[in-house]
Image (tube, rainbow, N blue to C red):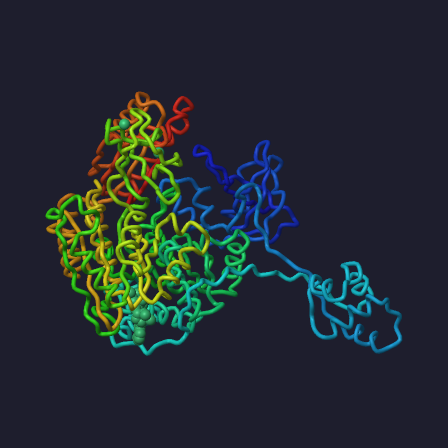
Amino acid sequence: MAILRVEPLTTARALRGPFDYRRPADMEGLEVGSVVRIPFGPRRILGVVVELADASELPPERLAEPIEALEAGAPAELVQLGLWVAREYCSTPSRGLRLVLPPGTGTGGRTVRSKVELRAEILPAGEAALSGDERLGVRQRAVLEALGEGEMSAAELAAAVGSDRQTLRRLEARGLVATRDSRLRRAPEAPALAAAAERPPLLADQERAVAAIVGALDGERPERELLLHGVTGSGKTEVYLAAVEAALERGLGAIVLVPEIGLAPQAVARFRARLGDRIAVLHSALSAGERYDEWRRLRSGEASVCVGPRSAVFAPVAELGLIVIDEEHDPSYKQEGDPTYDARAVARRRAADRGAVLVAGTATPRPESWLELPRIELPSRVDGLRMPPVHLVDMRTADPRSGPLHPETWEALEGVRAAGAKAIVMINRRGFAPWLTCRSCGHHWSCPNCDVSLIVHRHSGRLVCHHCAHIERQPSACPECSSTTLSQAGAGTERVEALLAERLAPMPAFRLDSDTVAARGAHARILARFGEAASGVLVGTQMVAKGHDFPEVTLSAILDADATLRFPDFRAEERTFAMVAQLAGRSGRGAAGGEVIVQTLSPGAASIAHAARHDSAGFLAGELERRRALRYPPFSHLVRIGLSAAHEQRLDQVAAALAAELRRALPAESDLLGPAPMFRVRNRHRRRLLIKASDRAGTIVAVREAVERRAADRSLREISIGIDVDPQ
Ligand code: ADP
Ligand code: ZN
Ligand code: ZN
C-alpha cells in the first residue's frame, strides 16, 4: 500500500508532522512536493507530501486519505531546502515549506490557480461542411468561417460573431471543430525604464571574471563559490549577464537575486532587455495571478532564469547551474519574519546541493564573504574614469543654526546647477522633522504606543510613528499650554527636498523614499523622471544609493553619515562603510567626472575614512581584526531571542528564567548576553537575549527546545518569543 507522509500547513509550533495518509487509487501522480487537502482532526487543511513510503506504523483502517490534490506542487529538491531552512533558522516545517510552494498556496483561504480559456480550431470536416451542402445554422456557419482564418478563443469568437459556448459545443459534437483549454499567461508589466538590448564587447577585466565563472560552470576550476569584488561602475551587471548566457548555452538555469525589487527596477529592465521571455520575475509587487504564472513558467521549464529579491532563492528553476547575488552586502537579503532566513546562506546551501556555481557581487563585500570566498576583482570603472574624490565635511565645525546642509555642500550643489548637471543627496530619515516640541513649555510629541518621538510629515500634515501605525494630525498649538510656537527640529527627506527646491530653483528636486514610492511603479517613475530631466537633484533615504546608473550625476552628498554608525550593533561600521561607498559610486559615472561630499561628526571613524579613500580591502582587514577580537561573525554564530509582552513584570520573570535555562543547556563555548531591555513598541515591553556560539547546530537545538517548552505552556500565552538566527 502506498503511504504519503504529509506535513500539515499549520502555524502551531508544538505540532510536528509528518503524518501518514493513504494514497487513493485516483491520486497515483502524487509525489514529494505535491500539495494536498487533508482531513486533519475536525478540520480540512492543506499539507505537503514530504515523503512516500510503502508502509505505515499505523493500521490501514486508521489512515485517512487526502481529499484532493492542488494543481501545482513544489519540486522535491525544494521540499528538502524548505525543511532545511526550518531547521537552520529554528522555525517549523510548515513555515519552511511555505517558502517553496507555488505563490498563493493556501493563503487567505483561497488558493491561486491558472487562468484558462477555451480555444477552438476548425477540423477538416468543418472545412468540408463550409463548402459542401451540410446543414449549418447561421451562427454555426459564422463560427466556422471565422475559424477558417485561424484558431480563436471562445471570448474572441463571442466578440467577432456573437457565438456562445453552446454553438461551439454542438460543432464539436458534430466533429467539425476541436476545442481545448489553454492556460493564459498573466504577464507582469514591463518596467518603465528602458535598457539597451545589445551586448557591449567585454573589457579585459570583465572577460577574466566571466572566464572564471564559466570555468567553474564547466567544472574546470575547483571553486564553486566566487566573490565578484568590483568597484561601483566596474560593469558587474555585464558579467552577470554573460555568466547567465553561458549557463543557458549549457542547458542550465539560473537565479539572479537583487536587492528588494522596488529598489532595482533598472537591474530588472537590463535583464529583461537582454534575455527576454527566458526570464521570469518574482516579487511582491506582482498580483497573485502574475506571480503564480511566473512561478509556473519556471516550474514547467518555459522560463529558465529567475530574477527577484530574496524569496527568489526558492524559485523552481530546473537544472539550476548558477546563482548570482547582486549587491551581496544588501541587508534586504535577510528576512525579518519567521523563518528569519538569510537568502545568501540559503543560496550557498542550494548551490552546494545542486553542484551549481554561486557568484556574489558587490563593491562593498561583507566581512564574511571577504574571508570565506575566493575573489575575482574588477578594480576600475568601465569607462576608465577614476573614482570620484570624496570630501569629508566636518559637521562639528558647522553652525547648528545653518540647517542640515553645510555651506560647502551648498556651494557644490550650486556648482551643479550652474553646470546644468545632476546631483544626489541622501539623508537617512524620511519625513520633515524628527522632533516636535513646544517652545513655551517644552512639551514633546511622542508616540503613545512606543518609546519614540513622532516624526512631522508636513506633506500629509501628520505626525507619524515610524515603529507602529500611529498617526495624528499635525497640531497648530500645544495641548498643554496652548502656545502656537512649536519647534520642528532636525531634518528628514521632506525638509531637505523643500530646502533644495527653494534654494536651487529652477533646478527641480525629486524625492525618493518609502513615502513617495508607496504606489505601484512609483519608484521606477521617479527614477525615470530624474533620468529624463535636463538637470536636477534626487533627494532621499538609502534608496538613492542603490543600483542605478545616471551618467549625468556629478555630485553625491550624504548629510548624516554617522546616523548608521551610532546604532548599537556590531554591523554599524560595515553598514556605514557600504552606505558611504555605494553613494559615492553614484557620482562621476560620465565624462564630466564627479565628486562626493560626506557630512559627518566622526570623520576619523574607520568606516568613513576608508570609504572616503575607496579602500574596501583596508576597511575589511581592520573590521575582520575587530570581529575576531570581539568574537563576532564570521568568528562565531549569533542567535538573538526577542521577548515581548504587555506586562513588564511578567516579561522580566520569563526572560530571566529563559536565560537561566539556556545558560545551563547551551553547548560549551557559548556566551549568553542579557536579558537586555529594548525600547517599547506597540505598547509592548521588549527584552532581548543574545547568544554568541561556536557550535551552531547544538545552539540551535538548545534554543529551539527551550523556546518550544514555553510555547507549549498556556500560562505564557501573552508573551511572544521570536528567534533570529544570524541576526543582521
Ligand atoms: P556596476 O554594476 O559594477 O556598478 P554596471 O554593470 O552598472 O556597473 O556598469 C556601469 C555602466 O557601464 C553601465 O552603463 C553599463 O552599461 C556600462 N558597461 C558595462 N560594461 C561595459 C562594456 N564592456 N562596454 C561598455 N559599457 C559597459
Ligand atoms: Zn506648550
Ligand atoms: Zn508607535
Relative to 537, does residue 433 appear above or below in the rendering? above
Is residue 613 toward the left or the right of residue 460 in the image?
left
> In terms of image quadrants, where is residue 521?
bottom left
Asked if residue 210 shows in the view, the reply is: no
Q: Residue, x 53% and y 47% (percent of image)?
A: 105
Asked if residue 31 shows in the view, the reply is: yes
> In terms of image quadrants, where is residue 95?
top left
Is residue 141 toward the left or the right of residue 603 in the image?
right
Indicate the position of residue 204 as horizontal and vertical percent values. 25, 77
Foreground pick, 230 / 101: 230
Indicate the position of residue 205 as horizontal and vertical percent values. 25, 73
Relative to 304, does residue 712 appear above or below in the rendering? above
Indicate the position of residue 485 as horizontal and vertical percent values. 27, 33
Foreground pick, 118 / 692: 118
Is residue 515 toward the left or the right of residue 579 in the image?
right
Relative to 62, does residue 432 appear above or below in the rendering? below
Foreground pick, 108 / 634: 108
Indicate the position of residue 524 as horizontal and vertical percent values. 41, 59
> In terms of image quadrants, where is residue 709?
top left
State ligand 3's quadrant: top left
